[in-house]
């Protein structure tokens, strides 16, 4: 039975508690994060479902807990602009926005630093990174206690509305998080505004708690609306669907044997033997480990120069759905 992130719950799963965020709860929460567990915490917008952003398996557990059937990129929370600049490359405009609105409900998408320790799963394989400095004393206290950047989507099950109180989080995720830090009701109750600052113009990806006009006043320039039919409730930023990571090599799914010249993306113990380039997502058939390795594996095999990557079958269910969704997109014909 593969570990889907659902099937082998560690004991702490059942001890999940809403904790008053005192000194001892914050110390425990920091330890959970460093151990790769999930901690839900308040921000000024909505509650976040946090994990160590540098630990790929911890990040994979976020997707398993949310029951998301696909990977979309996550926001990384850091204590201040200095920390953010070590992870991503800030243009002049990105820096002006950060200085004006951080700490606060603005998420800035920038290009990843080449040596960034952030897991590739956080970016869903994209060369960019979404960064935010939260303006909530408990979010800041957790960042200090953990000493790690926190990847955190809204703390709700996939398809449900974002949680704005600890009780909402518990309704959705109680048995799936190590701890829920209680900070009362959130101030905005609306997610952060997300802008793409990787190019020369600032592009709005998701409307949110910071109004566009406020951004434009700081920039002295218009913010580009990514699309006319921006749906604030859409689970993905507009534009994400087209810009997902696509390997150069073609992808052959459900491969049980390997053809000459193909690279092999294997899963489990019975991989066909090959002298060519190969990457096993998880020898033990663990879907959490496989999800954590997925984007690095595709990139490595793509870089080998093979024209085709043969992909062994990966079981559906839990994280298997999200892995197979991404592989199917990678295999689809491109224009
Ligand atoms: O207020 C908020 O932003 C909350 C709190 C917890 O910080 N977080 C939140 O996360 O709403 P989530 O995962 O539900 O939404 C993140 C949004 C998605 O629309 C995602 O596509 C976009 O940010 N995003 C993340 N990384 C991106 C990237 N590299 N490029 C483009 N969009 C990105
Ligand atoms: Mg969300």
Image (spheres, rainbow, N blue to C red):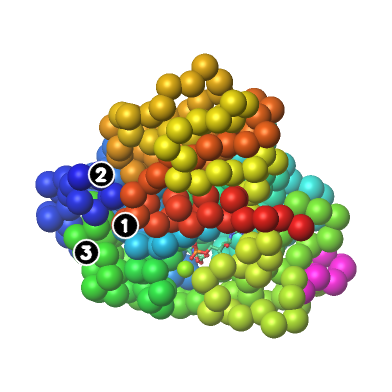
In the picture as drawn, the residue positioned furthest to the top comes out as 275
Q: Which residue is mark 1?
A: 317
Q: Circle 2: is it few (<14), some (14-19), or many (20+) Cα within 10 Å?
A: some
Nearest the viewer among 334 and 136 is 334
Mark before the other along the chain sequence, 3 or 2 = 2
Q: Are marks 3 and 2 in contact (CB under 8 Å)?
A: no
Does residue 273 appear left or right of residue 249 in this picture? left
Does residue 274 appear left or right of residue 173 in this picture? right
Nearest the viewer among 42 and 332 is 332
The answer to whether residue 33 is visible is no
Q: Circle 3: is it few (<14), some (14-19), or many (20+) Cα within 10 Å?
A: many
Q: Are marks 1 and 3 in contact (CB under 8 Å)?
A: no
Q: Nearer the viewer, mark 3 or mark 2?
A: 2
Residue 174: which numbered mark, if any?
A: 3
Inter-mark Cα distance, 3 to 2:
23 Å
Looking at the rendered structure, the secondary structure element under dot 2 is loop
Q: Quadrant of the N terminus?
A: top left
Q: Does 45 appear above or below 300?
A: below
Looking at the rendered structure, the secondary structure element under dot 3 is helix
Mark 2 residue's CB less than 8 Å from ligand 1: no
Does residue 186 appear left or right of residue 270 in this picture? right
| Residue 236 position by quadrant | bottom right
Q: Residue at x 75, y 52 (%)?
A: 198
Q: Which residue is mark 2?
A: 2
Mark 3 residue's CB less than 8 Å from ligand 1: no
Looking at the rendered structure, the secondary structure element under dot 1 is loop
């Amino acid at each position: 039975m593969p570990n889907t992130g659902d099937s082998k719950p560690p004991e702490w799963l059942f001890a999940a508690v809403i904790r008053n965020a005192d000194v001892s709860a914050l110390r425990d929460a920091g330890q959970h994060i460093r151990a790769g567990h999930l901690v839900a915490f308040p921000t000024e917008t909505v509650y976040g479902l946090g994990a160590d952003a540098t630990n790929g398996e911890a990040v994979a557990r976020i997707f398993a807990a949310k029951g998301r059937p696909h990977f979309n990129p996550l926001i990384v929370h850091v204590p201040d602009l200095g920390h953010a600049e070590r992870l991503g490359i800030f243009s002049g405009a990105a820096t002006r926005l950060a200085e004006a609105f951080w700490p606060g409900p603005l998420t800035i998408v920038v290009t990843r630093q080449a040596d960034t320790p952030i897991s590739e799963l956080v970016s869903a394989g994209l060369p960019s990174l979404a960064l935010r400095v939260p303006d909530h004393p408990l979010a800041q206290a957790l960042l200090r206690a953990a000493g790690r950047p926190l990847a955190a989507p809204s703390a709700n099950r996939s398809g449900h509305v974002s949680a704005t109180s600890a009780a909402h989080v518990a309704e959705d995720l109680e048995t799936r998080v190590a701890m829920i830090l209680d900070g009362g009701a959130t101030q905005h109750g609306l997610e952060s505004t997300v802008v793409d600052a990787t190019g020369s113009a600032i592009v709005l990806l998701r409307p949110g708690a910071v109004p566009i006009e406020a951004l434009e006043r700081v920039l002295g320039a218009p913010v580009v609306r990514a699309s006319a039919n921006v749906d604030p409730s859409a689970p993905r930023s507009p534009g994400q669907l087209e810009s997902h990571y696509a390997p150069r090599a073609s992808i052959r799914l459900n491969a049980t044997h390997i053809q000459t010249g193909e690279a092999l993306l294997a899963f489990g113990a019975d991989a066909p033997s090959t002298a060519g380039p190969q990457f096993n997502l998880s020898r033990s058939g663990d879907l959490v480990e496989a999800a954590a390795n997925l984007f690095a594996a595709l990139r490595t095999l793509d870089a080998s120069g093979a024209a085709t990557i043969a992909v062994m079958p990966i079981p559906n269910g839990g994280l298997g759905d999200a892995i197979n969704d991404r592989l199917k997109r990678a295999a689809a014909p491109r224009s």
